Amino acid sequence: MRPFSRPAMILSCLLVAFTSTSAVGSEGLMVTIKNDTTDNIYVTAYDRNSKPAQMVLSRQPIYGSASFPVTITADAAGKGHLSWTATTIDRDMRKCGHKDKPNLNDGDTVHVHADGDCGV
């Protein structure tokens, strides 16, 4: 068996390191869901790039001004797409909110709130 040359060994190590880094980067985008009010809310969020859409939060309580990290799928352009709904935890003063957020980048913050009327 022929021994590897030093340059070939270094090139092999770099190739393995690059491949590992690429695989980690392609696992998804980390975004933060932030309650931008002082109200305590339940948040449900969906990753819209997954086919079918994947729930990433299910009635997760997020207290006033707190945040919660989630990982979502990137599309071919490297962008994420998230939709969310929120309801206040306080049933006596029920408020709701929802929004669709396309074109998200890794590290973005999605601001959520429940300040509108709830449908019947």
Image (spheres, helix red, strand yellow):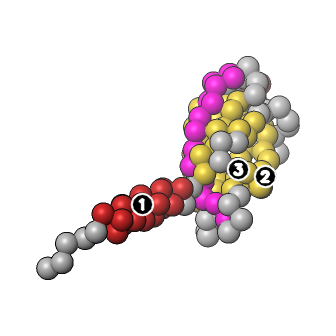
Callout 1–callout 3 Cβ contact below 8 Å: no
Local crowd size for mark 2, using a 10 Å CA cut-off: few (<14), some (14–19), many (≥20): few
Residue position for label 2: 100
The amino acid beneath tag 3 is: Asn
Q: Residue furthest left?
A: 1
Q: Quadrant of residue 97?
A: top right
The amino acid beneath tag 2 is: Asp
Q: Does the magenta stretch include residue 71?
A: yes
Q: Choose mark 3 or mark 2, whichever is in front.
A: 3
Question: In this view of the protein, can residue 31 be seen by the observer?
Answer: yes
Callout 3–callout 2 Cβ contact below 8 Å: no
Look at 58% across and 39% down and name the residue there. Answer: 69
User: Is residue 61 positioned above or below 99 on the image?
Assistant: above
Q: What stretch is highlighted in magenta?
A: 62-75
Residue 1 lies left or right of residue 17; in this view the side is left
Image label count: 3
Q: Is mark 2 on a helix, strand or loop?
A: strand
Residue position for label 3: 105
Look at 70% across and 30% down and name the residue there. Answer: 35
Look at 54% across and 56% down and name the residue there. Answer: 25
Per the model, the C-alpha gap separating discs 3 and 2 is 14 Å
Residue position for label 1: 14
